[in-house]
Amino acid sequence: MRRNDVRVAIWGFGAMGSGMAKMIIEKKGFDIIGVCDVYSGYIGRSIFEILAVDNPYSHDVIVTNNIDEVLDIGCIDVVLLATDSYTSTAFPKIVKIINKGINVISTAEEMAYPKANEPELSEQLDKLSKEKGVTVLGTGVNPGMMMDLLAICMSGVTENVRRFEISRINSLSPFGKTVMEEQGVGLSLSEYNEKNEKNEIAGHVGFKESAFMIAEALGLKVVDFNQSMKPIITEFDRKSPHGFAGAGDVCGVEMSAIAVLDNGIEIILYHPQQIEPEMAGVSTGDYIKISGKPEINLANSPEVEGGIGTIAICVNMIPHVINAKPGLVTMIDLPVPRVIMGDVRKLIRED
Ligand code: NAD
C-alpha cells in the first residue's frame, strides 16, 4: 500500500467545491485537509456540519477565508480551485498555489484550454509549474469533456474526418442564482439587449477552448473562429429552483460557434441552455456527429448533468494530475478519465 492519504484542499466551497468535498468524503484513501471560501455564512463552520455528513477523519475541517492558513498546513497533494470562470481571474490564485509547490485542478472554463484566450498567461503558468515541479489542469463537464474530449476520443476510431457537429442541449434548472444572472434568465428582451451590449451576459464560456483543444489533438490549428448567442424567449411562465422567466421573457440562451481548421475541417458547436426545457418539449442530450470514415453518431439523452459531471471529473482526475509530469496540462495530455471506485492511494505511482 502506498504512503499516506491523498491530501486535498478546496478553494471555493460553492456548488462545485462543496460537491467535490461530498464525493471525496465517500471515497477511500483521501483526506480533506482544508477549505477556503469567502462566504460569510460558511466561515468558521465545520464542512461536515455544512454538508450534513459524518466526519470520517480524525480531525475537523473548518472553513476559513484566509487561503494562506490552508496552504501552509503542508504536504498537500492537490488544491481543487472552484472560484472562477476566466483564466485571468484564476491566474493569481493558481500562481499562489504553484508557489507553495502544490498541484492544481481548476474548474475555470477558460482553464480547460487556456492557450485559446490567454497564451501569455498560459506560458507563465507552464514555466512556473515546471520550475516548482507541479501540474496544473483545468477541467469540467463542458469544456473539458462533453463537447471536446469525448469528440476527440471518438475520432480515434476514424481514418479521417471532414467535420464535427457537437451539440449539448441542456437544462439550467439545477443551477443557482449566479448562473441565472450570467445567462439572462428572467430578463425582458429589452433588458437582455441592454445587458448584452454591455457584455454582461456571459452565456456559455468554453467554445473557443473546446475548438482549440480538438484542433491541437488532431495536429491542426484553428484558422477561423466565430461564435454567436441569442436569447431563448419562453411562451409561458417557467420556474426553476433559482430562476423564473415569465411568458415573453428570456429563459436562457442559444449559443453557436463554427471553427475552421487549417486543412478545412469544420467544428460546429451548438449549445442551447434554458430553464425547464421539457416544458417546451425540448429533451436534453449530448450529441457528437463526425462526418468522416466511418460516420459517427453518438447520442446521450438526457444530458450528463453539468453539476455532477464537473464535480466527478475534477475528483476523478486527481490521481492523473498527481502522477503527471510537471507543467500546465489539458485533458488531452493525461490518461483517459475514469471513476475512482477503489482506494485512491492504489492509483498513485510511487516513481
Ligand atoms: P459558485 O458560485 O456556487 O461557487 C463559487 C464559490 O467560490 C462561492 O462559494 C464563493 O464564495 C467562492 N469564492 C469566490 N471567490 C473566492 C475567493 N477569492 N476566495 C475564496 N472563495 C471564493 O460556483 P460553482 O457552481 O461552484 O462554480 C465555480 C466555477 O466553476 C464557476 O466559475 C463556474 O462557471 C465554473 N464551472 C465550470 C464548469 C465546466 O464545465 N468547466 C462546470 C461548472 C462550473
Image (cartoon, rainbow, N blue to C red):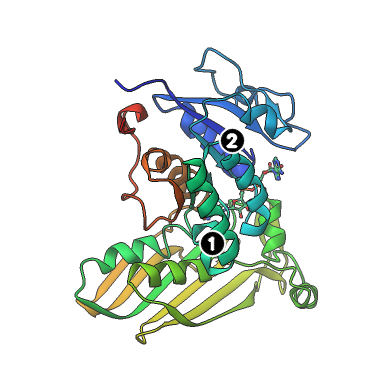
Q: Could you tell me which quadrant the N terminus lies in? A: top left
208 vs 45, nearest the viewer: 208
Q: Residue furthest bottom?
A: 264
The residue tagged 1 is 114
| Within-10-Å neighbours for mark 1: few <14, some 14–19, many 20+ | many
**Residue 318: percent from left, percent from top:** 43, 39
Q: Is mark 2 within 8 Å of ligand 1?
A: no
For the residue labelled by badge 2, is the local secondary structure a helix, a strand or a loop? loop
Inspect the image, locate mark 2, and give the three-letter code of the amino acid beneath it: Lys
Give the quadrant of residue 222: bottom left
Q: How many marks?
A: 2
Inspect the image, locate mark 1, and give the three-letter code of the amino acid beneath it: Pro
Dots 1, 2 in contact, CB < 8 A: no
Q: Is residue 54 visible?
A: yes
**Residue 117: percent from left, percent from top:** 58, 68
Q: Residue furthest front?
A: 131
Residue ID at (41%, 28%): 27
Q: Residue furthest top?
A: 58
**Residue 101: percent from left, percent from top:** 54, 36
Residue ID at (40%, 55%): 331
| Within-10-Å neighbours for mark 2: few <14, some 14–19, many 20+ | some
Give the quadrant of residue 34: top right
Q: Does residue 28 appear left or right of residue 139 in this picture? A: left
220 vs 140, nearest the viewer: 220
Q: CA distance from mark 1 to mark 2?
A: 21 Å
The residue tagged 2 is 100
